[in-house]
Image (tube, rainbow, N blue to C red):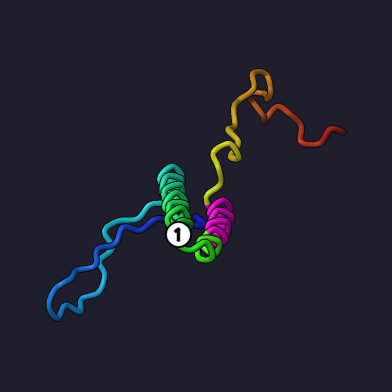
Amino acid sequence: MALIEAVLTYYPKGIGDQSGQVIIGRTEDDNILRILSDHIISQAKEEVKMWSSIDPGVAAMCQADVQKLISILSFLVPDEELQPELKSIKGGKNEDESKVPLDRNE
């Protein structure tokens, strides 16, 4: 079960339209989630830059939000390096495990 998934949603807009949302697709693909996560963090950092020239107090609050966002997203969408890539080691296991006793004392 995935901790997080990305959902592409369509919200129809029109006069008197009350139909709500239409889910077009969803994904749990780590690569897509990582790209979205990086983009969201990048946008949040741009907002900090924008506010730093206007109001340093608001910029400081936005910077704190960026740090929270980075912390949350790094937990939900871990970096690739943290995911081990398992490889077969030559000579690491017998091909026919039925011949290998389960107990060393046998």
Which residue appears at 47% of the width and 52% of the height?
45
Q: Which residue is mark 1?
A: 51
Above-or-below relation of 86 to 59? above
- Does the magenta segment cover residue 86? no
Residue 63 position in % (x across, y down): 54, 58
- What SS does tag 1 mark? helix
User: x and y percent of residue 12 in the render?
Assistant: 19, 68
In the depicted structure, whether residue 88 falls above or below residue 61: above
Q: Is residue 66 above or below residue 79?
A: below
Between 25 and 97, the one lying in front of the other is: 25
- For residue 24, say whether it is visible: yes
**Side of 101 where 50 appears, left or right:** left
**Magenta-tinted stretch:** 63-76
Q: Which image quadrant: the C terminus?
A: top right
Residue 54 vertical position relative to residue 103 in the rendered view, above or below: below
86 displayed left or right of 22: right
In the displayed structure, does residue 84 sit left or right of residue 27? right
Residue found at x 30% / y 56%: 25
Which amino acid does the dot numbered 1 rest on?
Answer: Trp
Q: Main secondary structure of the magenta part?
A: helix
Residue 42 is situated, as x and y percent measured from the top left of the image, at 44, 49
Most distant residue in the top direction: 90
Q: How many marks?
A: 1
